[in-house]
Amino acid sequence: MNQYTCTDYRLEMILLGLNRKLNDPHVDPEEKDAIRREILRIEEEMDRRADAA
């Protein structure tokens, strides 16, 4: 059975914030690229955590 942990919640909240920032029209394109890379990194981490459970 999969356990929903504080780490899972934290990662989801980080993703939510990053996606919100990604949609901000005042963020410059270079920062948006960095945000996209961070989103991918976190999603990969979440996938690894789900596979391990």
Image (spheres, rainbow, N blue to C red):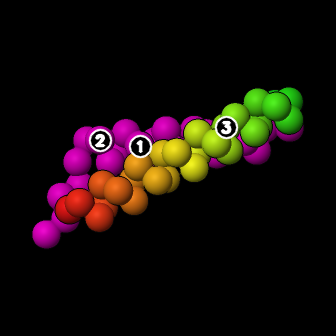
Find residue 37 and report its image quarter. top right
Count neighbours of disc 3 (C-alpha within 10 A) and say few if under 14, some if 14 to 19, many if 20 or more. some
Q: Residue at x 86, y 35 (%)?
A: 29
C-alpha span from label 1 to label 2: 6 Å
The numbered mark, 3 or 1, whose residue comes first in the sequence reads: 1
Q: Which residue is mark 1?
A: 11
Q: Are marks 3 and 2 in contact (CB under 8 Å)?
A: no
**Residue 36 located left or right of residue 7:** right
40 over 35 or under it: above or below: below
Q: Residue furthest bottom?
A: 1
Element at badge 3? helix
Nearer the viewer's eye, disc 3 or disc 1?
3
The residue under the point 30% across, 61% down is: 50
Q: CA distance from mark 3 to mark 2?
A: 20 Å
Pointer 1 local density, CA inside 10 Å: few below 14, some 14–19, many at least 20: some
Majority SS type along the magenta span: helix
Callout count: 3
- Give SS at disc 2: helix
Q: Earlier in the sequence, mark 3 or mark 2?
A: 2
Depth check: give the residue in front, 3 or 51: 51
Where does the image place residue 23, in percent across and percent down from the top left? 76, 44
- Identified by mark 1, the residue type is Leu
Residue under label 3? 35
Kindly indicate whether the residue at mark 2 contacts the one at mark 1 (C-beta within 8 angstroms). Answer: yes
Describe residue 48's horizontal placement relative to residue 52 as left or right.
Answer: right
**Which secondary structure lies at badge 1?**
helix
Query: Looking at the picture, how far across and down is residue 44, in whole percent?
Result: 46, 53
- Quarter of the image where one finds residue 20: top right
> What amino acid type should be assigned to the residue bearing mark 3?
Ile
Residue 9 at x, y = what percent?
34, 45
Q: Residue at x 76, y 30 (%)?
A: 31
**Residue under circle 2?**
7
